[in-house]
Image (cartoon, rainbow, N blue to C red):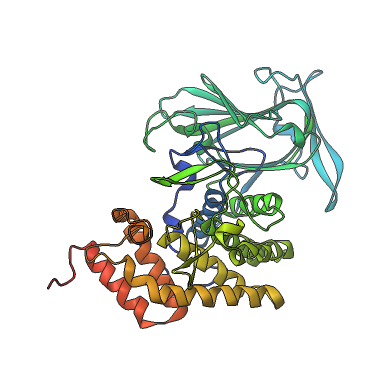
Amino acid sequence: MYDIQPVYHPGGLFLNFDHYNVEQRDAIMCVTAGDGVPLVNQWNPAGYFYAITVAQYGLSHHAKGILGGNPTPRLVAGGELPPTDWVNTGPESSITTVDSTTEQGVRKVLSFSAPDPLTSLGPALTLNSKEHTICMDLQLSGLGGVTIQIKTKQDKIGYIHFTLSDQYMVVNDSHVVYGMGQGNRGKWVHLARDIDIDWMKTLGRTKYNDPTHLAEIIDVTLHGTGFIDNLTVSTSAHNDHLIHSADWLVKNQDGKGGWPTNVGMKTGDNIQLKPGWYSAMGQGQSMSTLVRAYNLTGQKHYIETAVRGLHLFELGSEEGGVRARFLGQLDWYEEYPTIPTSTFVLNGFIFSMLGLYDVLSTAEGEGHQLAEKLWQAGMRSLKQMIGMYDSGTGTLYDLRHVINHEQPNRARWDYHTTHIALIEEIALIDGDQLFYQTAKRWRDYFYGKRSRHN
């Protein structure tokens, strides 16, 4: 069980997410190259984007950056450095410094030209780096790409390629290709890659210290034609991952202000959601991600996107929104907004509440007013309903036993500890002794105590 921070702030560490390693989960197929966010295969083996996972990826790295720091990356190549350290240059392979016009103005970058095949020789830069995070700004003109040669703990060689392929990840023996998408042809793409994760995702289910995992980055080779700048190595790129998540949320928000899940799923007997469903938890954690990106950068489009995310909280599940009403009276923001019956999942509701709090604490004007209205309605419900999730020996995941007359859905211990952390966070924000007392009792359950019997 991980403790939360003593103070909650919309620009600060989110819950105990510094302990989350989202990209290492078995349900994550890979971190995509084009967007820099996780691709999930839990409910569809072909892979799909899930707003909750995208947000958690950004929030976890933001939290790690706060507690562990964001190391200054080491610049190894770019327009500001002479390209004299690159080898394998000649008549067919060249790399030179040129001026490039970008949104930020004219800057010096490296222009390269080499044979297209990914296994061919091209301009190469030796790194021999024990630091496993590589960042770069890359623009490809067509075929070709960037190859990163790695060595495993068993001294075997592997190759990680980044191209304009529309396939997210293709593994062929010791080679893996991550596609940035044909839509990025001729466009600058910022890659921030944890190469150890990129390689780990080719291995299937392995332990993190498995000898087949990455030990060292050997070199970088360029193929085809294009431009490259700001090639760096470091131990992490936490803020880059936060911004990639926030940018994906800006790009993929729909006209209702939501981030729909494009695969269906079942939450229990006769309870299912069709493709295109929204989640209050997804809305809330996405808003928390966007607020932190805004606080980090000051760029207003992040908070504006977060404010638009409030709209679905005003709509009932039967209207395509995320709000249910317990006994027709108390507003509840549903992680899984099923109809005609609701499940009233506890952790998803509180995660959505944290998103509302982040927006009301950051936004101004109508956005602030709407977030505060939704927050107050949710707090009224939580204070009246929290006792129904207490089993006397642990907590309940939801209220399907009350609504649908099913057997109680007891929370696993990992969900129970999440419930504790969430209630402790709400206690810090609201200050009501009800939450402090509830959190203490639930902690006691974790250590074996039980409620009194008659």
Position of 233 relative to 353 (above/below): above
| Residue in front for this viewpoint, 125 or 409 | 409
Residue 117 place in picture, x, y as percent: 70, 18
| Residue in front for this viewpoint, 121 or 310 | 310
Q: How many marks?
A: 0
Q: Is residue 93 left or right of residue 202?
A: right
| Residue in front for this viewpoint, 148 or 280 | 280
Occupied quadrant, residue 299: bottom right
The structure residue drawn at horizontal position 33% and vertical position 56%, both measured from the top left corner, is 405
Position of 292 relative to 380 (above/below): above
In the rendered image, the residue lying farthest to the left is 454
Occupied quadrant, residue 193: top right
Residue 340 place in picture, x, y as percent: 49, 55
The structure residue drawn at horizontal position 48% and vertical position 58%, both measured from the top left corner, is 68
Position of 344 relative to 78 (above/below): below
The structure residue drawn at horizontal position 17% and vertical position 66%, both measured from the top left corner, is 449
Q: Is residue 13 visible?
A: no
Quadrant where the N terminus is found in the figure: bottom left
| Residue in front for this viewpoint, 191 or 261 | 261
Q: Is residue 264 visible?
A: yes
Residue 136 place in picture, x, y as percent: 68, 42
Occupied quadrant, residue 164: top right
Residue 362 place in picture, x, y as percent: 63, 73
